[in-house]
Amino acid sequence: MLLDIRNLTKRFGGLTAVSNVSFGIERGEIIGIFGPNGSGKTTTLSLIAGILVPTDGSIVWKGKDISALPPFEVAQHGLVKTFQNPQLFPELTVAQHMRIACHLHIKRALGFGRVWSLFRGMPAELNGTLTRKIDQMLELCRLADKRNEEAGALSYGGEKMLGVAMGMVCEPELLLLDEPASGLGHDEIMNLDAVLRDLRTHGVTLCIIDHKVGFLGRLADRSIALHHGAVIATGKTADVLANEAVVEAYLGKKHA
């Protein structure tokens, strides 16, 4: 198993945001996490990414407990999280953002020697490798024609796709996506769907949370439903969405 979440719990004072959540992710899957507002979805992804530290439980990545690692070390291990609203620099181009996101690749390649690159410049071979990788990711994320545009000129959908591309250039084995379809129109969602399917064909495992049930219902192989921080259903996505407890959590007991 690629990722094994065991009894994951997060408390903020007297509030339990995530309660004894357990699930696994196999390599090559697209996993969906459903739940109404306040169900613990984003908190769960933040715990996996090392942004938050669990109160209890464990996060086991390829057999190693990474529960106490800081976010940059989690990312170095191959778990990368995107954010619902990418924090971009409006005056920098798409390509410049991608170059910034190459920091993990540079660290792996140069180690502490990367400090000298600030004065001597990037080694030509590594610079060429990064340029090719950036071009590949921009092509994959349908942003190749935007590479020289400033981020401030992108549509909201373009900003979110740039966030995905920046995550991908970090070379993740598991990409955690937080509400990638929120705020997007129909055509942008269909483009996102196609991009995410292409990412899987390139060997990336995906774990996605989103409120757009139709989008995630079509995309996810398996799903986990959360309510009040606890798992209320797991299994094939169609079965989870038809589960009475899940329908009740979204629409109320009358509709369930």
Image: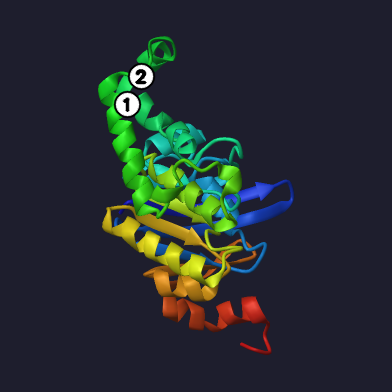
**Residue 127, label in figure:** 1
Ranked by sequence position, the earlier of labels 2 and 1 is 2
User: Which residue: 51% across, 43% down?
Assistant: 149
Query: The C terminus lies in which quarter of the figure?
Result: bottom right
Q: Which residue is mark 2?
A: 122
Instruction: Identify which amino acid the numbered label 2 is placed on.
Output: Met
Query: The N terminus lies in which quarter of the figure?
Result: bottom left
**Residue 62, label in figure:** none
Q: Quadrant of residue 191?
A: bottom left
Provide residue 54's location: percent of width, then percent of height. Answer: 56, 44
For the residue pair 82 and 55, the one nearer the viewer reads as 82
Residue at mark 2 to residue at mark 1: CA–CA distance: 6 Å
Determine if residue 57 is in view. no
Above or below — where is 44 with respect to 121?
A: below
Q: Secondary structure at mark 2?
A: loop
Residue at the far bottom: name it: 254
Density class for disc 1 (Cα within 10 Å; few <14, some 14-19, many ≥20) is some
Residue at the far right: name it: 14
Instruction: Identify which amino acid the numbered label 1 is placed on.
Output: Asn
User: Which residue: 65% across, 55% down?
Assistant: 17
Q: Quadrant of residue 150?
A: top right
Above or below — where is 31 with respect to 12?
A: below
Q: Secondary structure at mark 1?
A: helix
Provide residue 186's location: percent of width, then percent of height. Answer: 53, 72
Q: Are marks 2 and 1 in contact (CB under 8 Å)?
A: yes
